[in-house]
Image (spheres, rainbow, N blue to C red):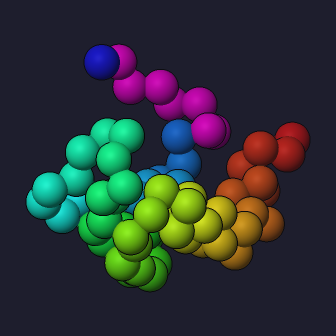
Amino acid sequence: MKSDPSPKNLPDLVFVVQFRDPTEPGSARFAGRAEHVMTGQNTGFETPEELVHFFGRVMNQLKPRSQKGLRQ
């Protein structure tokens, strides 16, 4: 896998997701924990929607800072 140095790979957009056992793709069981690496914000989730909501919430909080590098 090659590293892409473009602005879309900003370190403030890095998350760690840990799934609890048993998590199976396509099943109703989709639980775990997610953490935003730079801020330490974290959440537990029980559904894909809760996980996506966490990503969106954190990314919206960071949006002004992340877009600074994209504007030139």
Confirm whether residue 8 shows in the render.
yes
Residue 56, relative to residue 3: is it above or below?
Answer: below
Q: Name which quarter of the figure residue 40 lies in.
A: bottom left
Q: Which residue is at a point 36% across and 78% down the rendered structure image?
A: 44
Closest to the observer: 16 or 44? 44
Q: Magenta region's main secondary structure?
A: loop
Q: What segment is highlighted magenta in the picture?
A: 2-8
- Residue at image x 54%, y 48%? 10
Which quarter of the rendering shows the N terminus?
A: top left
Q: Is residue 57 left or right of residue 23?
A: right
Residue 37 position, x and y percent, is 37, 67
Q: Residue 14 sits in which quadrant?
A: bottom left
What residue is rendered at 69% in x and 58% in y?
Answer: 66
Which residue sits at x=79%, y=66%? 64
For the C terminus, the quadrant is top right
Compared with 23, 46 (above or below) is below
Say left or right for 49 vs 17: right
6 in magenta: yes
